Amino acid sequence: MAPTGGSSPRIRDLREALNSAADGERSLLTRAASTATQRARRHKRAKPLTLLPLVALCFYDVSGGPFGIEDAVSAGGPLLALIGFLCLPLLWSIPEALVTAELATAFPEDSGYVAWVTAAFGPYWGFQEGFWSWLSGVTDNSLYPVMFMSYLDVLVPVLKGSWERTVLLFAVSLALSYLNYRGLSVIGGTAVASTAYIIVPFVVMAALAAPHIEPRNWLVQDWGTVQWGSFINVMFWNLNYWDSVSTLAGEVAHPRRTFPRALCIAVMLVVVMYVGPLLVGLGVTTQASDWELGYFTRVAQIVGGGWLGWWMVSAAAISQIGQFEAEMCSDSFQLLGMAERGFLPAILARRSRHGTPTLAIILSSVGVLGLVSFDFLQIVELLNIIYCLAQLVEFFAFLHLRVKLPHLPRPYQVPLPTWALAVMLAPAIGLLVGIIALPFITMRWKVVCWTVGAIVVGAVLHPLMQLARRKEWMTFVETSPEKFAASLVGYEAAATEEEEVAVNGAAVPGSVDRHRMARMHSSMELPEEVPPEDYKDNDGGPASPWYASSTASSRDSLQSIPEAEEIDVESRRRVSTNL
């Protein structure tokens, strides 16, 4: 109970702590309050992505259906392809999805994995992660118009090699970019409906083929003809990009609850949509060498005739649209998130009236148009190696953050200690290193030059952007990458200090400083349009865990100290004036 008169030693300590606040600490708190205010304003905006749209976008970021797995059969053989799609999700997809679920809920914002790596290793590596991921994503997005045309070529062979095909490729790419510009509400709803449309023709094909399936076809394997490089690249491409949805974390309603559920459902959906059609297709055909991009259309013709073949082509078209839109969302919102954090010019953070980043979409679309003339396997090889560089940095950042920021609020946390996480990620890291090394070993010099070029450009771009900020060649937001990195690490300290306050009012070293910080925060007024309840999501959790402890929660802690009421108003006024 608070004393009724005089000043207790604890009151005197608190008053002295207030009056002797250091300049550096005041600067940190001012920055924290500013960041918290900005994020609270953004959190007031309605989040367009709920569970089902997020599941659909995860599905499209990674898979979009079995379109594109055909080359795994021709390169590896029926048995090896089946084994790969059953085992690789355990070694690769599930670990990557778990890492994404933990870090996307700890840092729920549009910069996604850029925030993770920046928190772990600083702004330089955060920029490299962002640049490599964007370059890989744009390269990946150029695949989908190519894949659609390959499926159409099966039924309309006259298009092969014609100028009409090239014109159609560019027209499809531009039309899909415009759809992305229309907004995430349109994209999310479209993704759910199109996912259902893709699943149905494969269910029909499986039902019609069931009496004719020969299970012995599944066991055919010629180990001497396996093209390991192509097989590994196609398998890996079909099961990666689980981290892409993290760049939409700022657009997700209730991320701490929605992200883990969406990723879990999406992993199961992807595996079923690969293995099921593969069992059907291999069961009714005998020549593995016939499997090439677009082959499921031929299987549909064999099983059900021309009508099912055209249905499969339309499903392939919908799949490519969905994959294009999901990837374009991730790429463009990643640039927006980096611009909001000072890595890139502020113009990239501008949103259209639909809430989408206009210039970021245009830049990503230009990159796509520059690559659509390449063939499928060339594009896969180029995007995989850059993606592997970025993913290696993400995995190491994940492990490093477990050690560096053990008290970082993680609404979802993988229930394993750090050493077990390292063991879980070891096979995935080995796979990444192998894919990076492969073109160097096989002397694929185009891929080698592409990789070295990406590393060099990324290394030059970061200091160039910082020079442009200093020289004011371009306009940047007030927050710099360095301030962003400091805020990511600084907010974890508040959660650490929370543990230093003993029960029953007994103070331990560090508690006075924490409450001094809390009081300084409470003296700063937030805008009226940001009420305290906006710092929480609808299911009671913190809206943005990594900053909440330095804003609303610090005020709650202040109110929990009875003696706080006796702190004289003059001391609070002095601190407020200094700030």
Image (cartoon, helix red, strand yellow):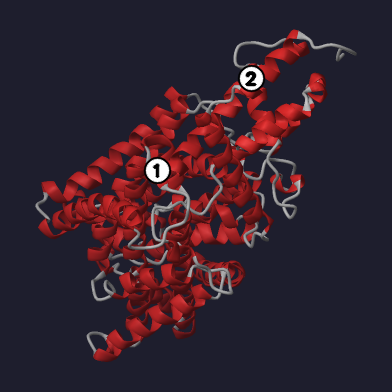
Compare residues 191 and 274 and report the one nearer the observer.
191
**Secondary element type, mark 2:** helix
Question: Few, some or many C-alpha atoms within 10 Å of disc 2 (few <14, some 14-19, many ≥20)?
Answer: some
- Position of 378 with respect to 98 (left or right) is left
What is the quadrant of the N terminus in the image?
top right
Position of residue 184 measured from the top left corner of the image (x, y, whole percent): 57, 67
Which is nearer the N-term, disc 2 or disc 1? 2
Question: Few, some or many C-alpha atoms within 10 Å of disc 1 (few <14, some 14-19, many ≥20)?
Answer: many
The residue positioned 63% from the left and 48% from the top of the image is 37
Position of residue 52 measured from the top left corner of the image (x, y, whole percent): 63, 59
Residue of label 2: 17
**Secondary element type, mark 1:** helix
Residue 114 seen: yes
* Mark seen at residue 185: none
Q: Amino acid at mark 1?
A: Trp
Residue of label 1: 92
The residue positioned 46% from the left and 73% from the top of the image is 321
